Image (cartoon, rainbow, N blue to C red):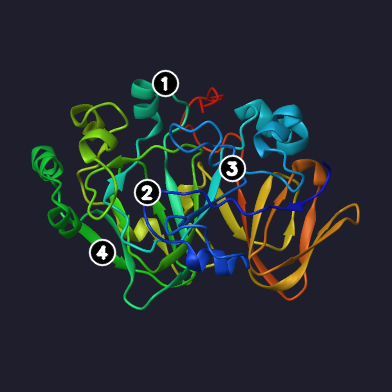
Amino acid sequence: MTGPQLLPRNQPDHFYRGGERLAAWRRGEPPAGPRQPEEWLASMTTMSGQAERGLSRLADGTFLRDAVGRDPVDWLGPAHVDACGPSTELLVKLLDPGQRLPVHLHPDRAFAARHLGLGHGKTEAWIILDADPGAGVRLGFAERQDRSTVRAWVDRNDSDALVRALRPIEVRPGDGVLVPAGVPHSIDAGVFLLELQEPTDLSILLETEDLPLDLRRDGHLGLGFDVALEALTLDPVDVSALVVRDRPRLLPVAADPYFRATRAGAERAGFAVVVVDSGAGRVVTSDGGTVIVRRGDVAVIPHCAGPWLLDGAVSAIVCRPPEPGAGEIGPARPREDPA
């Protein structure tokens, strides 16, 4: 493997409905069932409790995880491997919810290390690709909450109270939203987005309206809610620092220690996931290699491909891991998260 390649679709079954817009955007067959609202891109992460589900395959059927494990320096570059080991430090997804996602949160690295023995939490960010009129997201509590009040809502599975307590944000294509670990959030049906996140599948659910889940069994990562709710941010967040729109940056500066997203142009060497959102053109590497791409394609580019550029009447989002050493947010070389 020395150059970029297109990734096959990887749209696993999930617990919530959706996926038709995603499948059409990827120019593929309709989803095999009503609960395929996510595509996991360049994933070396499995879904919680699964041995292989969620892992991405390369064009020849090899798991990306196995390919990177065999040649981490070629795939990730020596500086990245020195800092992080054979982990991409990144999971990219396309999300197409056909129903409101439940109010939930994700633990930070300190909580995950202390209670789960993992090297990553789950800070994430969204780049809005499309949104129905009036559809939006909810990010953090609108007012400071008492933990006992939230616990009472959880015990009653009080979806209405939890949704009302969050701050609504209407979104439009091009908006970028950072969701720090610990912040409760939800996404409306009709919002189609690209998500970058730390490489885990860790969610703490606060309610399960219209979902085939048992909140008391499935909501707390096996820790019980007494422990799980320690991960919850009770104070409102500064939305102005977490949402960018109509700016050259796709994501707020605070995302940089976790992941990066830029518009494709002339790019330097480094592991990258390229999501083509309009037009058609070519990925051209420094050695003259090319890959034809068009709207809906996703390409993965290893470090050993060298510098490259996106050529033609085409636009794409380049998703990358953090720069090695970009912020002390966890152990310098976190151990590999178990499947």
- In the picture, measured across the screen, residue 46 lies left or right of residue 227, that is right
Q: Label 3, label 1: how many angstroms apart (C-alpha)?
A: 21 Å
Judging by the rendered image, the residue that carries numbered circle 2 is 15
Closer to the chain start, of discs 4 and 3, is: 3
Q: Residue at x 58, y 40 (%)?
A: 55
Q: Is residue 160 above or below residue 231?
A: below
Closer to the chain start, of discs 3 and 2, is: 2
Judging by the rendered image, the residue that carries numbered circle 3 is 43
Mark nearest the camera among 3 and 1 is 3
Q: Label 3, label 2: how many angstroms apart (C-alpha)?
A: 19 Å
Disc 4 on helix, strand or loop? Answer: strand
Closer to the chain start, of discs 3 and 1, is: 3
Closer to the chain start, of discs 2 and 4, is: 2
Mark nearest the camera among 2 and 4 is 2
Judging by the rendered image, the residue that carries numbered circle 4 is 168
Do residues under tags 2 and 4 come within 8 Å of each other at their CB atoms?
Answer: no
Q: Amino acid at mark 2?
A: Phe
Residue 135 placement (x, y as % from top left): 33, 71
Disc 1 on helix, strand or loop? Answer: loop
Disc 3 on helix, strand or loop? Answer: loop
Instruction: Classify mark 4: residues with Cα within 10 Å, few (<14), some (14-19) or many (20+).
Output: many
Q: Label 4, label 1: how many angstroms apart (C-alpha)?
A: 34 Å
Judging by the rendered image, the residue that carries numbered circle 1 is 117
Residue 170 placement (x, y as % from top left): 32, 70
Closer to the chain start, of discs 4 and 1, is: 1
**Where on the picture, by quarter, is residue 149?**
top left
Closer to the chain start, of discs 1 and 2, is: 2
Instruction: Classify mark 2: residues with Cα within 10 Å, few (<14), some (14-19) or many (20+).
Output: few
Residue placed most toward the observer, 83 or 285:
285
